[in-house]
Image (cartoon, rainbow, N blue to C red):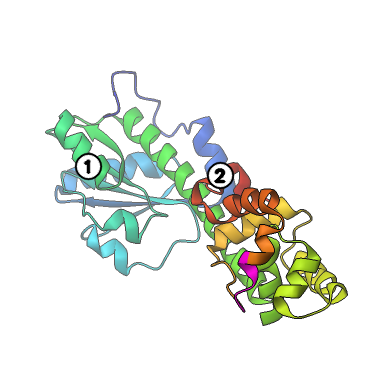
Amino acid sequence: MRPSSYPAPSAGRPSAMAGSIRSVAPCIVFIVAEDPSACRGMAATLDDMGWRVREIASAEALLSEPECSVPSCLVLYELAMPQHLADERAETPVICVTGHADVLGTVQAMRAGAVDVLAKPLRQDALIASVELALERSKDLLVQHREEKALRGRYALLSQRERQVMSLVVTGLLNKQIGGELGISEITVKAHRGKVMRKMNVRTLVALVNSAGRLKLEPYTGQGRMKQAQSASPTASSSISALAWRRSDVSNPSMNRP
């Protein structure tokens, strides 16, 4: 639960973080509250910060809203956090406001996917700080989603043969071994490999391995000779295969940016 014991900012005076977010895109803050006066008060505070405020009927109603192309978040006032909401609308983080905040309630809200829990009486500074953090997270998620969409688009440009070559390259096999697995010449493998690197917009094997991991590609099984080929170079194969097929090795956010 976020502390709210520090002084509230002057009305209509945006913070530095809020300014940086608004300079990127017009953010949207959804509000759900059964108390009309509380809803109006929060809307006025958030509107003063320059954010677009949308009042919706319920948390579930967010699911029928078009997916936001700009940073967004949802403020739930005195309402339970739906279990499935965080999964289905991950790009719209949820902030819960409650008059009965305790450790158990906070933990339950966080487990349901809330990014923050604020206690009543709600102070302007606490609400603004929480919304700023939620919008920053939303912005990061939108960037990640766009990168993943672009990555899938690049992979879709590969021919079937190029996808086979890519799947074998990221296991650490040499061009000669890949050629033996696919029944093609080493020169042909080199040509396909070059096209894969260009189409996937990568310059190094490590970057290609990272792309394969983010795409969650299945290892090529082909004609059954791959296991024998891998045994000819166990060190390289095992080390690079570990990078390609173990999710933990590609989950570092710093590797998700080109």
Question: In what element is the residue under mark 2?
Answer: helix
Q: Is residue 224 magenta?
A: yes
Q: Is 24 in the magenta?
A: no
The kind of residue tagged 1 is Ala
State the image coordinates of residue 151 (x, y, percent, origin top left): 62, 64
Residue where numbered disc 2 is placed:
253
Q: Position of residue 105 (x, y in %)?
A: 16, 36
For label 1, count other residues whose C-alpha is less than 10 Å away and answer few (under 14), some (14-19) or many (20+): many
In the picture, measured across the screen, residue 144 lies left or right of residue 234, that is left
Residue furthest out toward the left: 100
The answer to whether any part of residue 18 appears in the image is yes
Up the image or down, 213 lies above or below 160; here it is: above
The mark that comes first in sequence, 1 or 2, is 1
Residue 101 appears in the figure:
no
Q: Which mark is residue 119?
A: none
Residue 193 quadrant: bottom right
Q: Residues within 10 Å of mark 2 (few under 14, many from 20)?
A: few
Q: Which residues are magenta?
A: 223-227
